[in-house]
Amino acid sequence: MRSSLLTAGTILLVSSVASGQVCFEDTISDGTMSASEWSTELFLTRGLVGSVTATQLATGGNPGFCWRVFQSLSDDTGLTAVHTYAPACYDPADSGGIQTIDFAIDYQWVASDPPPPVSGEQRFGLAANQGANTFVAAGALTGMNTNWQSHLQTGITSANFVLKSGSGTLDLSANAPPITFGFYTSNNIGPTTITFTREVNYDNFSVTITRTCEGDANGDGTVDVNDISYVLFRLGGACPPCDGDANGDGAVDVNDISFVLFRLGSVCP
Ligand SMILES: [Ca+2]
Ligand SMILES: [Ca+2]
Ligand SMILES: [Ca+2]
């Protein structure tokens, strides 16, 4: 629970959220892919000969802006680039534990060298940062189709994530540290002196949280009258951050009160 001290008209919020971040309640999405909001971190294994360039394109997205990922590798190298959406985080201590995560993104293969039929796709999937630790969840291959395609992956749990850097496991439980989401792109190449490049566009990144305890608007582990007060006090509030959006539909309104009422007394795991 984020502590809130009310003294002499001053609200002091104490939390470990990075400056400038707003923690979302249930859904975060971005179709702009701005370089000022997205950052890319490169991880290399084995041969260690690789690079990545990730940039915002103003046109050609699905629609409008998109994120172009150009990867280059050679000499028995494993390459993973983690692209992180910095403005948003999910804070279990404020919003409750996470039962499952749904991940969606659109992708469009652009070019590869050597050209097809040599395999020239990228692997991609959900990524998460918690504290100094980075995790990735097995995703899919883009293939080499120049049309925009949509990827939807539902029901992702902590068991689906593997550690990419740092230590430990991704903690989705109530009171866990804030989590910042993004996606990774990766490639592997065997022993060769030829440089392989793969270029893919991405757009419409989206993460949707299903909480462990539905209706627990204030994130204290029970669904009771305090959750109704919590929503009432925030009716019509800004979204994001959607504080009080119990049903996760992107608005804080009377439907959230009904949602909580219907679940009063629910036993939270
Ligand atoms: Ca777009
Ligand atoms: Ca509650
Ligand atoms: Ca709502």
Image (cartoon, rainbow, N blue to C red):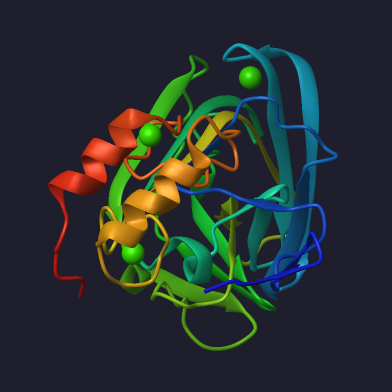
Q: Position of residue 29 (x, y in %)?
A: 55, 34
Does residue 223 sit above or below 195 in this rendering? below
Does residue 57 sit above or below 260 in this rendering? above
Q: Position of residue 93 (x, y in %)?
A: 50, 71
For the residue pair 256 and 127, the one nearer the viewer reads as: 256
Left or right of 93? Residue 83 is right
Q: Residue at x 48, y 49 (%)?
A: 25
Q: Position of residue 120 (x, y in %)?
A: 55, 38
Left or right of 147? Residue 31 is right
Q: Residue at x 67, y 61 (%)?
A: 192
Give the residue at the far right of this rendering: 36
For the residue pair 211 and 236, the one nearer the viewer reads as: 236
Q: Is residue 192 visible?
A: yes
Q: Position of residue 33 (x, y in %)?
A: 71, 32
Image quadrant where residue 262 sits: top left
Q: In what quadrant of the picture does the C terminus appear? A: bottom left
Left or right of 137? Residue 72 is right
Q: Is residue 194 visible?
A: no
Image quadrant where residue 217 sits: bottom left
Q: Residue at x 67, y 56 (%)?
A: 81
For the residue pair 181 and 147, the one nearer the viewer reads as: 181
Left or right of 123? Residue 87 is right
Image quadrant where residue 30 sits: top right
